[in-house]
Image: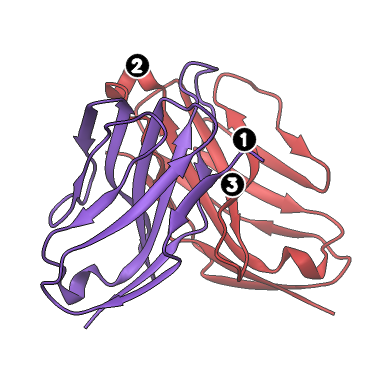
Amino acid sequence: EAQVTQNPRYLITVTGKKLTVTCSQNMNHEYMSWYRQDPGLGLRQIYYSMNVEVTDKGDVPEGYKVSRKEKRNFPLILESPSPNQTSLYFCASKDSALWVGSPLHFGNGTRLTVT
Amino acid sequence: AQTVTQSQPEMSVQEAETVTLSCTYDTSESNYYLFWYKQPPSRQMILVIRQEAYKQQNATENRFSVNFQKAAKSFSLKISDSQLGDTAMYFCAFMKHALAQGGSEKLVFGKGTKLTVNP
């Protein structure tokens, strides 16, 4: 089944403790991206990657890191999480080569709570 | 910068009736794409419908259709014969043509409309 898989689904951590949220897609998509969703704000892009070893900042990149060493994986790293990073996070991918304007395919989300 | 506005934070409809969710956007681009995504309580983001700005014909997917008014920058979603399973948060989203934004292919989302379908 074609899908974007995020882990974990829920995560509770403390301020300053490094964490990684994994994301993997099995659709051979070039493009991958991370979004965060907050009440009343909709979804906002954190980082994106157009292909392996190519990453760039989105609208809210502060406090996050990403890497794209393999085409299928795009982990989100919080080196020193803070309470304002408590949010619902989505990984997404799309086939940029297939057709322009193709939709994003989303993972099931990771609910992160930083205390 | 592009903005997407969903002016109805919450709506409700009776089962089997029709409901329309509104969305307006602001852009100076002529070539772009518009989407409606559904987010049920399970939190999944599910694509409902997609519209290409250069196409005048309104997109339709089964019970879901859009009213795309390019000059007015309006992109409303109509749900016909509403079902209990349509209860969800609905997000309108805008994407510039990839060549117009250096390949970021970013989706700009509205804040969402929470739709409740009542039995």
Q: Are marks 1 and 2 on the same chain?
A: yes
The chain drawn in red is B
Question: Is residue A63 positioned above or below A66 on the image?
Answer: below
Residue occupying the point 44% across, 43% down: A24
- Name the side, left or right, on which A88 lies relative to B38: left
The chain drawn in purple is A
Q: Position of residue B10 (x, y in %)?
A: 57, 72
Q: Are marks 2 and 3 in contact (CB under 8 Å)?
A: no
Q: Earlier in the sequence, mark 1 or mark 3?
A: 3
Mark 2 packing: few (<14 Cα in 10 Å), some, or many (20+)?
few
Q: Position of residue B7 (x, y in %)?
A: 49, 62
State the CA–CA distance, disc 1 to disc 2: 19 Å
State the CA–CA distance, disc 2 to disc 3: 22 Å
What's under tag 3, amino acid-wise? Trp
Q: Position of residue B20 (x, y in %)?
A: 69, 57
Where does label 1 land, which residue? B50
Where does label 3 land, which residue? B36
Where does label 2 land, which residue? B99
What's under tag 2, amino acid-wise? Leu
Residue occupying the point 64% across, 66% down: B88
Mark 3 packing: few (<14 Cα in 10 Å), some, or many (20+)?
many
